[in-house]
Image: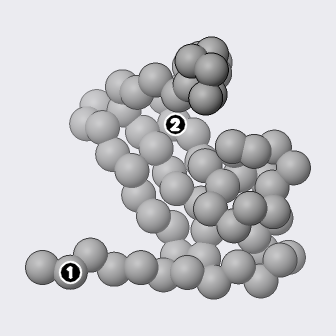
Amino acid sequence: MENRIKISDNGPLEVTGEFQLVDSEGNEYTKKAKVYLCRCGLSNKKPFCDGSHKRGGFESSPRASG
Protein backbone atom coordinates (compact mmCIF):
# COMPACT_ATOMS: atom_id res chain seq x y z
CA MET A 1 0.00 0.00 0.00
CA GLU A 2 1.22 3.47 -0.85
CA ASN A 3 1.98 5.88 1.98
CA ARG A 4 -0.59 8.65 2.03
CA ILE A 5 -1.77 11.51 4.24
CA LYS A 6 -5.19 12.82 3.27
CA ILE A 7 -6.55 16.06 4.71
CA SER A 8 -10.27 15.59 5.36
CA ASP A 9 -12.48 18.64 4.88
CA ASN A 10 -13.35 19.96 8.35
CA GLY A 11 -11.84 16.85 9.91
CA PRO A 12 -8.74 14.81 10.69
CA LEU A 13 -5.65 13.73 8.80
CA GLU A 14 -6.05 10.19 7.45
CA VAL A 15 -2.68 8.40 7.41
CA THR A 16 -2.34 5.08 5.56
CA GLY A 17 0.48 2.83 4.42
CA GLU A 18 3.77 1.93 6.09
CA PHE A 19 4.53 4.55 8.73
CA GLN A 20 5.79 4.87 12.26
CA LEU A 21 4.01 7.19 14.70
CA VAL A 22 6.13 8.27 17.68
CA ASP A 23 5.72 10.80 20.48
CA SER A 24 8.22 13.56 21.26
CA GLU A 25 10.31 11.14 23.35
CA GLY A 26 10.51 8.58 20.54
CA ASN A 27 7.98 6.15 22.04
CA GLU A 28 6.09 4.35 19.29
CA TYR A 29 2.30 4.16 19.22
CA THR A 30 0.71 0.79 18.39
CA LYS A 31 1.04 0.11 14.66
CA LYS A 32 -2.11 0.21 12.58
CA ALA A 33 -2.72 0.22 8.82
CA LYS A 34 -4.66 3.49 9.08
CA VAL A 35 -4.97 6.23 11.70
CA TYR A 36 -6.90 9.47 11.92
CA LEU A 37 -4.96 12.32 13.52
CA CYS A 38 -6.68 15.29 15.16
CA ARG A 39 -6.36 18.71 13.47
CA CYS A 40 -8.90 20.65 15.53
CA GLY A 41 -7.24 20.30 18.94
CA LEU A 42 -10.49 19.25 20.62
CA SER A 43 -9.96 15.47 20.76
CA ASN A 44 -9.77 13.73 24.12
CA LYS A 45 -7.69 10.98 22.45
CA LYS A 46 -4.87 13.13 21.01
CA PRO A 47 -3.06 12.66 18.76
CA PHE A 48 -5.99 10.62 17.41
CA CYS A 49 -9.31 11.98 16.27
CA ASP A 50 -12.39 11.17 18.37
CA GLY A 51 -14.92 13.10 16.28
CA SER A 52 -14.87 16.23 18.47
CA HIS A 53 -14.41 18.41 15.37
CA LYS A 54 -18.05 17.76 14.47
CA ARG A 55 -19.55 19.25 17.63
CA GLY A 56 -16.78 21.85 17.96
CA GLY A 57 -17.53 23.45 14.60
CA PHE A 58 -14.02 22.99 13.24
CA GLU A 59 -13.72 24.30 9.67
CA SER A 60 -10.72 23.85 7.39
CA SER A 61 -10.71 22.73 3.77
CA PRO A 62 -7.22 23.42 2.38
CA ARG A 63 -6.50 22.66 -1.27
CA ALA A 64 -3.19 21.92 -2.94
CA SER A 65 -2.13 24.58 -5.40
CA GLY A 66 -0.47 23.57 -8.65
Q: In which quarter of the image is residue 26?
A: top right
Residue 41 is situated, as x and y percent measured from the top left of the image, at: 74, 62
The residue tagged with tag 1: helix, strand or loop? loop
Type of residue at label 2?
Lys
- Looking at the image, residue 41 lies above or below residue 58: above
User: Looking at the image, what colour scheme do you see?
Assistant: one colour
The residue to which callout 2 is attached is 34
Quarter of the image for the C terminus: give it: bottom left
Position of residue 30 in the picture relative to residue 32 (left or right): right
Residue 25 is situated, as x and y percent measured from the top left of the image, at: 62, 20
Q: What's the mark number on residue 31?
A: none
Q: In which quarter of the image is residue 56?
A: bottom right
At a point 42% along the width and 39% down the height, the residue shown is: 16
Identify which residue, 55 or 66, lies in the foreground: 66
The residue to which callout 1 is attached is 65
Position of residue 21 in the picture relative to residue 47 (left or right): left
At a point 36% along the width and 32% down the height, the residue shown is: 17
Position of residue 39 in the picture relative to residue 63 (left or right): right
Residue 35 is situated, as x and y percent measured from the top left of the image, at: 57, 40
Position of residue 62 in the picture relative to residue 66 (left or right): right
Quarter of the image for the N terminus: give it: top left
